[in-house]
Image (cartoon, grey):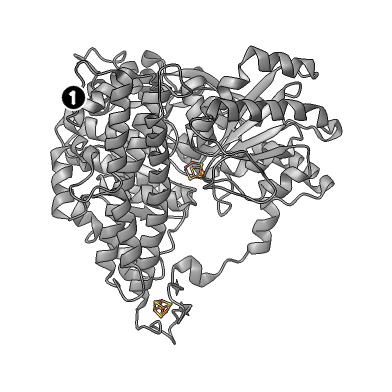
Amino acid sequence: MKDWAFTTTVEEMEAATNSLLETAQKVGADTWQKRVKDQTPHCGFGESGTCCRICSMGPCRITKKAPRGICGCDVHGIVARNYLRFTAGGAATHSDHGREIMHTLHQTKEGGNYQVKDPEKLIRIAKEWGVETEGKDIYDLAHEMAEIGLLEYGKPFGTQRFLKRAPEHTQKLWHDADIEPRAIDREVSQSLHMTHMGCSSLPEALIRQALRAGLSDGWGGSMMGTEFSDVMFGTPKPVDTTANIGVMEKDNVNIVVHGHDPSLSEMIVYYANDPEMIAYAKSLGAKGITVSGVCCTSNEVAMRHGIPMAGNFLNQENVVLTGACEAIVVDVQCIFPALGPLSKCFHTKFITTSPIARMPDSEFIQFHAETAGENAKAIVKMAIENFTNRKTELVNIPDQVQKARVGYSVEAIKKVLDGVANSQVDEFGTTKPLIECVHAGVLRGAVAMVGCNNPKIRPDTAHIALMKKMLENDILLIVSGCSAQAAAKAGLMDPEQAKEYCGAGLKRVCELAGIPPVLHMGSCVDISRMMILASDISKDWGIPISQVPVVGCAPEWMSEKAVSIGNYVVATGIETFLGVDPYTKGSEEVTQLLQGDHGINEWVEAKFVVDTDIERLGDKMIACIEAKRAALGI
Ligand code: BF8
Ligand code: SF4
């Protein structure tokens, strides 16, 4: 076994959390750790997906004695319907985030709150979409592209524009399986329609639609979210930052941004750096202003500005429990309603900003693209003025920080890996150096590790254990979402230290390219970046995506978004490994469709592998990568 002495272990992180839980007890605050106990054991029908409440003749629960619901639907129909609804919720959520980004793009103007920071990328996408760019003002082009992008949500005919980015083989599989996503809203609506009482109960049809709805997210809404965020806020490049709870600073005004949409956090970061604001903070006794992040909003601003990452999903209460958080500012998704009452136990302002995520016990400052500057300034000011209300006796910021290098967009990965081999690079670089490393066996393959934390798994243990196992086996990691933050908190993105613990091949690649062995590709909508990378590798290599030694993994997932992601990753031809069951075990038929050799595997050349034993899940991932290598004869 390797010596991972430099890393912050899960045990150390837990000890830090425990010291914060002592404060919680002192102030009488409720925490998720306690609520999990209150909710355990969970409902067995819910867990196996065998409860139906989509009409008021029910709820119907399937047992041996009662094998059908009142309408006659069997367990397979009920489980598959629940699975499709789960997917549709996620596809809607990611895609609506993408839609907000397109609306923001429509508001861009020279000298305005939002501008075009990567005009080359905008022009590149415009050309891809067949939009005339010659002689056009960049803002006219941005607005035109925003309108076209918004039509992807509701256009009456045709399929998603970005599907053309996939290898032809993949496009053909999608076409033949009848899962090419049409308008995004249509796929979500149709999923709800199909699962309405008295519509589909045939598992195969429901699972097919789950793949299609997932694809409308990954190759539609999420991809637009990612690509046009890059256009407005810049395409990420490698940048050094820090991670874990110790990034909060005792003597500074601490503003924590949480959620997903970078439109808000970009503005907060901008005004927190405003000399006028810093001077104001100093006038009230602080040394400065520290913005740090939680969840995917954190990933967005870390990737583009090196803003430190305070923690991931199950750390969101911890930032308030430090007693040093002046404001936690949230936009949408993955925000615990618990933050309202929790913030009331401290001086913390809990500021909600989106009509999509309204919560009790918060201060609502609606964020509009037109007034974003004023809104952000008001929020930063409110946080500064709250500094003097701190209860100093409650302040406890555990001293845990790790260095992390982040910012690996597809563009950045291609660029840095050109340092490893002397391949010919075209205008935007190629994935050939990466392919050469995999071909030669210097790298055995790659794992795209993504997703959340879930109290069903000791937080971060699965992410970190699996990552270590992969690194030791010369398997490169590309990561996003809360998985990325788990890696950063542990120290696995430290480019100096983490490489020491890799297998010899991976270590060499890291040294030559100057990269950490775990590459932070962004937030969860940025899993679309991984799809583009996989497609480019497949095209450059000349083999289908399903033959590339790459697998996906979400070991601690919890949200509907994660299910939608799982569907589009698998549908793109990437075998996907889950450490938490997606509420399908109640139906053998649905389980076989998703996990067997003769279900979705026959349509898209990949399937799900579910194993709640994390050690075994890791072994299966390595075996899958090695089997792909053997099949290629490498
Ligand atoms: O979209 S990984 S807990 S923060 S859902 Fe949420 Fe899961 Fe974190 Fe980002 Ni993704
Ligand atoms: Fe029960 Fe059928 Fe209504 Fe579902 S749709 S609640 S199974 S009667």
Name above or below for residue 128 compared with residue 564: above
Name above or below for residue 175 compared with residue 421: below
Seen from the viewer's position, the closer of residues 75 and 347 is: 347
Q: Position of residue 489 (x, y in %)?
A: 57, 31
Q: Position of residue 253 (x, y in %)?
A: 72, 24
Seen from this angle, which residue lies furthest right? 393
Q: Position of residue 586 (x, y in %)?
A: 41, 70
Image quadrant assignment for residue 99 = top left
Disc 1 residue type (three-letter)? Glu
Q: Is residue 492 something that shows in the picture?
A: no
Seen from this angle, which residue lies furthest bottom? 65
Relative horizontal placement of residue 586, taking residue 41 as reference (left or right):
left
Name the residue at 49% across, 66% down.
Answer: 47
Is disc 1 placed on a helix, strand or loop? loop
Seen from the viewer's position, the closer of residues 620 and 216 is: 216
Q: Position of residue 234 (x, y in %)?
A: 40, 21
Name above or below for residue 217 compared with residue 57: above
Name the residue at 28% across, 33% down.
Answer: 532
Q: How many marks?
A: 1
Name above or below for residue 424 compared with residue 527: above
Q: Quadrant of the C terminus?
A: top left
Relative horizontal placement of residue 140, taking residue 341 as reference (left or right):
left
Name the residue at 32% across, 29% down.
Answer: 143
Q: Is residue 530 something that shows in the picture?
A: yes
Q: Which residue is mark 1?
A: 132
